[in-house]
């Protein structure tokens, strides 16, 4: 039997992965945040903020470097879906990176709408790398539809 090297971080990595899965599940159950298998892979999962103010529900999604034409916002029932793709500006073959923290590829985030969100009056605008989605609160039903995104080209 050959001796094996002990890796003190191997068990820690497993524990952190398990903790991450459990926290994702807790947030999904508590706040209605959902991810499907493979969701967010590639670009990384864009950060979101959601809040209510003056009887309006807001969602802000960080999408730096993503063109408006590459974004999709849709509502189906009580689920808001934001998806898109951030395309690389140049090929990695052009140079050797010393540091590369920028993510490219497709992403998708889903968020449960609060009760009374009026998806018929939803608006979406993308400006300075932030996609802001808003809709008034007060309606009892939401239907499925795709939302046009306003903003800079």
Image (spheres, helix red, strand yellow):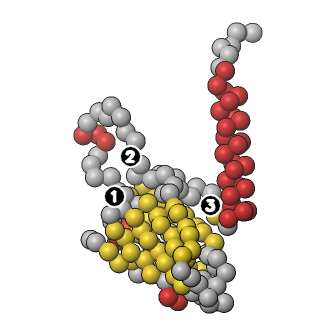
Q: CA distance from mark 2 to mark 3?
A: 22 Å
Would residue 63 be visible to someone looking at this image?
Answer: yes
- Residue 18 position by quadrant: top right
Q: Which mark is residue 35?
A: 3
Mark 3 or mark 1: whose residue is earlier in sequence: 3
Quick one: quadrant of the C terminus?
A: bottom left
62 relative to 52, above or below: above
Q: Are marks 1 and 2 in contact (CB under 8 Å)?
A: yes
- Residue 11 position by quadrant: top right
Count neighbours of disc 1 (C-alpha within 10 A) and say few if under 14, some if 14 to 19, many if 20 or more. Answer: some
Q: Position of residue 112 (x, y in %)?
A: 63, 72
- In the picture of the structure, the residue carrying the numbered disc 1 is 65
Residue 111 vs residue 103: left or right? right
- In the picture of the structure, the residue carrying the numbered disc 2 is 102
Q: Position of residue 97 (x, y in %)?
A: 32, 34
Residue 117 vs residue 97: left or right? right
Q: CA distance from mark 1 to mark 2?
A: 10 Å
Mark 2 or mark 3: whose residue is earlier in sequence: 3
Q: Which mark is residue 118?
A: none
Taking depth in this image into account, of 77 and 137 the one nearest to the observer is: 137
Mark 1 or mark 2: whose residue is earlier in sequence: 1
20 relative to 72, above or below: above
Q: CA distance from mark 3 to mark 1?
A: 22 Å
SS at circle 2: loop
SS at circle 1: loop
62 relative to 82, above or below: above
Residue at left offset 38%, top offset 75%: 125
58 relative to 103, above or below: below
The residue at the far left in this view is 94
């Amino acid at each position: 039997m050959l001796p094996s090297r002990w890796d003190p971080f191997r068990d820690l990595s497993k524990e952190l992965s398990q903790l991450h899965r459990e926290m994702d599940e807790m947030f999904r159950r508590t706040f209605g945040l959902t991810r499907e298998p493979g969701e967010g892979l590639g670009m990384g999962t864009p950060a979101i903020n959601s809040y209510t103010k003056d009887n309006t529900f807001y969602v802000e999604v960080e999408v730096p470097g993503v063109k408006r034409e590459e974004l999709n916002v849709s509502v189906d029932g009580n689920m808001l879906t934001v998806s898109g793709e951030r395309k690389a500006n140049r090929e990695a073959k052009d140079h050797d990176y010393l540091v590369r923290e920028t993510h490219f590829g497709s992403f998708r985030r889903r968020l449960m709408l609060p009760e009374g969100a009026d998806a018929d009056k939803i608006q979406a605008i993308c400006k300075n790398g932030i996609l802001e989605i808003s809709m008034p609160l007060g309606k009892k039903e939401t239907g499925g539809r795709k939302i046009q995104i306003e903003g800079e080209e």
